Amino acid sequence: MASFPENLQYSREHEWVDDASPATVGITSVAADALGDVVYLELPEVGTEITAGQVVGEIESTKSVSELYSPVTGTVVEVNTAAADDPATVNADPFGAGWLFKVDVTAKGELMDAAAYAELAE
């Protein structure tokens, strides 16, 4: 069974979010593996109001284009321009350098802990 960082929460759409302020959002290793080589990221702009469960961008890989969903509601305060410039970072380090954006969170969506996400991901 795959292991996932215990300090994160996870969405059914395979995004993760931490409890920091602002909160960091990314996609899980499961999503990165399923996508294959990520070649393009369309991320929300700084200042964008986003809603948990809503589409906030796209991730394009050599296999497909997938929608990116926000696990939280709030305002985007930073985007990972380094990952946008080098999307392979998402595959190489999805829980670290491959983070996607940061949000001043006003509400969380339906999230699960690492153990529940590991069961979903099996």
Image (cartoon, rainbow, N blue to C red):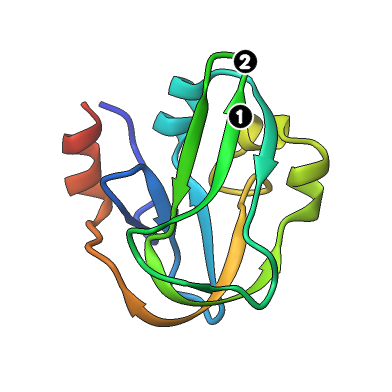
Mark 2 residue crowding within 10 angstroms, few (<14) / some (14–19) / many (20+): few
Camera-side residue of 119 and 15: 15
Mark 2 element type: loop
At which x and y percent is residue 78?
69, 70
- Identify the residue at image location x=45%, y=66%: 18
Mark 1 element type: strand
Q: What amino acid type should be assigned to the residue bearing mark 2?
A: Thr
The vertical placement of 40 against 71, above or below, is above
- Identify the residue at image location x=72%, y=35%: 87
How many numbered marks have been drawn onto this rendered protein structure?
Answer: 2
At which x and y percent is residue 103?
55, 74
Q: Which mark is residue 32?
A: none
The vertical placement of 43 against 75, above or below, is above
Q: In which quarter of the image is the N terminus?
A: top left
Dividing the picture into quadrants, the one containing residue 121 is top left
- Identify the residue at image location x=41%, y=49%: 15
Q: In which quarter of the image is the C terminus?
A: top left
The residue that mark 2 highlights is 62
In the image, taking residue 11 as reference, residue 91 lies left or right, namely right
Camera-side residue of 1 and 45: 45
* Label 1 with label 2: CB-CB less than 8 Å: no
The vertical placement of 51 against 121, above or below, is below
Q: How far apart are marks 1 and 2 (CA)?
A: 7 Å
Q: Residue 60 carries which label?
A: 1
Q: What amino acid type should be assigned to the residue bearing mark 1?
A: Glu
Dividing the picture into quadrants, the one containing residue 54 is bottom left
At which x and y percent is residue 6?
34, 55
